[in-house]
Amino acid sequence: METAQRLIFLSQSIPEATSRDAQLLRLLQSRVSVEVLCYLSRAYQTPFVVSMFSRRRGLFTKHSKAMVRALEERAAPGRLLWVSGSEMADYIPLAKALGYRIVREERNLDFLRNPLSDARRRRSEGRFCRYSDWLVAASDLDATRLARIAPDAPIHVIPHSVACTEYAPVRARVGTDLYFNGALDLPAQAEGLEWFIAEVLPRLRGALGPRLPRITVSGRNPSAGLLSLLEANGVRVVPQPGYSDPEAAARLLSEALIVFVPSRAAAETRGPILQAMAAGRPVVCTGRASEGLVLAPTYDVWIADHADAFAGAILRLIDNSALREQISARAIETVQKHYDWQGVGARLDELLRKLGEVQ
């Protein structure tokens, strides 16, 4: 494909290896030239250009002065700006005035579950959507929710995806850990872990005693309180692998016997679920964590929303190797069929053709 001028990808930070942004950037980078604009954060080596700027805001504005200057310097008529998440949406009106064409992806849509909730946010999100040329949703469910606040906006679904072949080596190893990977600075994920520690872990300890596997949590930016809670309960906490360290992500998955995702919302949870499935690791998760993924409960993953059921699913998988193998095999088949990024990449190609970015 012939590439047009460099696409600007506006993100809060350089993405971690398992994040939705990392998935999109890998797909985009293989098709168009990409530059990421983000706030100053932990730096990783990446295959694309990254420019980081101070968060320091101007007087009476939500905008970083340095980020505004960067957008102004790169502005060109019709240049494509991909805006990731609600954190960077405040730049959309400015970017539109500078002549950018805007693709907006908003994936934390849990506030739209209740039509009466957070009216102020609904209005602001609707305004940002109207400024955008295209909206990107990560699932058909998300697209339906976006349509409620932007009924006239074009919406393109690009599902979460995973490079299945990259996880084949992990499948050959049988791990021993109970493993969680997520964004610990997101309230839904932090609250889910707190619930796991308070309600699920005592049930596991009571049933297993000294047979309880090591519990490993990999996540970004845990609060001091959450970190203290995890360590006090004997949980091993390791940093979340960065974009440039897929080997570390694979190593942590290879150490896992079961992956658990107790999140109270689908906030950066779908990617880790699919990666665990591609690695042949049985997943126990809440219904909210897997929301938007088309998965069969007890067939592809084990879904449980109450402490007894969540602990019971983990116990059953620990004690039944045949069941683990069955769910692992089905999970691999489902991911390869529906979420491998060869198929998802075709969805991205379709959007880029509509935008004139590739021919």
Image (cartoon, rainbow, N blue to C red):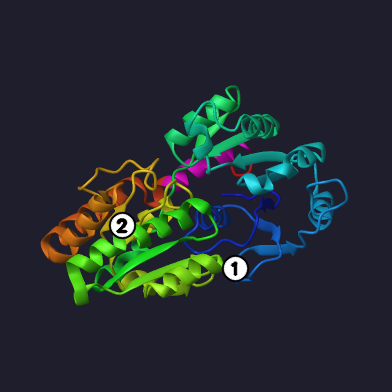
Residue 21 horizontal side relative to residue 5, left or right = left
Q: Nearer the viewer, residue 42 or 318?
A: 318
Residue stretch rendered in magenta on the structure: 344-355
Quarter of the rendering occupied by the C terminus: top right
Residue type at mark 1 is Thr
Q: Residue at x 37, y 48 (%)?
A: 339
Q: Dot 1 corresponds to which residue?
A: 46
For the residues marked 2 and 1, what is the alpha-carbon distance in whole angstroms?
25 Å
* Left-right relation of 307 to 7: left
Residue 40 in the image: x percent, y percent?
A: 71, 65
Is residue 9 a member of the stretch shown in magenta?
no
Instruction: Identify the amino acid type marked 2.
Output: Met
Disc sitting over residue 277 in the figure: 2
User: Of callouts 2 and 1, which one flags the residue occurring earlier in the amino acid sequence?
Assistant: 1
Q: Is residue 240 visible?
A: no
Q: Residue at x 19, y 61 (%)?
A: 315
